[in-house]
Amino acid sequence: MSTKISAAEFRRTTNVFFGLAIAWFVAVIIGSESGFFSSLYQPLIGALVAVSIILPTIWYFSSSRVRLYVEAIGHRRIMLLHMWRIPAALMFFWYGANGQLPPLFWILAGVGDFIAGSLALYMAFKPESLRRYWIFNGFGFLDFVVAVGTGLTYTLLQDERMAPIAVLPMALIPLFGVGISGATHLMAFDMLRRKD
C-alpha cells in the first residue's frame, strides 16, 4: 500500500470532504431554522453531537485512503482549523453575559475554546514539533470533554437555558464545529501515536 497520496487524489478527496462539510453545514442551518432541533427531546442534541464526532472518526480508522489524506493535510493545518474556536468562545461569552446559557457551561466552554483557539494560532507560527501537537490536541480534546460533558449534563437536566444550542447561530457550534474538531483531535492522536 502506498504511504503517500497523489496530488490529483488529494484534490479529489478535498472536494469530497468540502462537499460533505457544506452539506452538513446546510443541514444544521435547515434543522435550526425549521425548528427541528428545538422540537427534539433536549438530550438528543447531545447524542447528535456524539454521532458527529464518531462517524468521521470511524471513517478515518476504516479507510486507508482517508488516513493518507488526513496525513497529507498535516498537523499544522489541522491545528489551524481550530482557530474557529475563538469566535465560538466570543459567542459563548455573549450568550452567557445575557443570561441565555447556564453560567458553568458558558464559562467552561467559552474559556476552554478561547484558550484552544489561541493556542492553535500561537503554535501555528512555531516550528513543527510533535510535543507541541500533543499539547495542543491534549488540551483541545480535554476542553471538548469538559464542554460537551457540562452541556450534556444541563440538557439531561432539561435546563431551559440550553435552548440556544438548538437555534442559529449557536447551533453551529455543537452541531457542526464540535463534530469536525472532535474528530480531528482523535485523528491527530492516531497520527502522533504512529510517529512516536
Image (cartoon, rainbow, N blue to C red):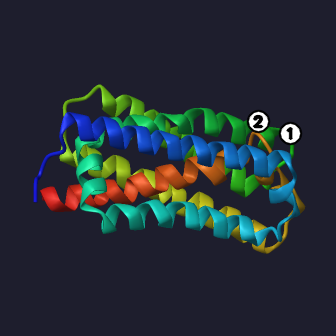
Question: What is the crowding at mark 1: few (fewer than 14 residues within 10 Å), some, or many (at least 20)?
Answer: few
Q: Quadrant of residue 193?
A: bottom left
- Which residue is most to the top? 125
Residue 116 lies left or right of residue 1; in this view the side is: right
Q: Where is residue 1 shown, x and y percent of the image? A: 10, 60
The answer to whether residue 109 is seen in the rendering is no
Picture coordinates of residue 71 (x, y %)?
A: 24, 48
User: Which residue extends farthest bottom?
Assistant: 156
Q: Identify residue type, mark 1.
A: Asn
How far is disc 1 from disc 2 in space, using C-alphas? 6 Å
- Label ID, residue 98: 1
| Whether residue 24 is situated above or below residue 8 in the rendered picture | below
On screen, residue 115 versus residue 119, left or right, reads right
User: Which residue is located at x 53 percent, y 35 percent?
Assistant: 84
* Dot 2 amino acid type: Trp
- Mark 2: few/some/many CA within 10 Å (<14, 14-19, 20+): some
Name the spot of residue 91 as percent of width and height, x first.
70, 37
Are the residues at dot 1 and dot 2 in contact (C-beta closer than 8 Å)? yes
Provide the secondary structure element on which disc 2 rests. Answer: helix
Name the residue rendered at 61%, 67% in the picture. 149
Residue at 23% across / 42% down in the picture?
Answer: 72
Residue of label 2: 94
Locate the C terminus by quadrant.
bottom left
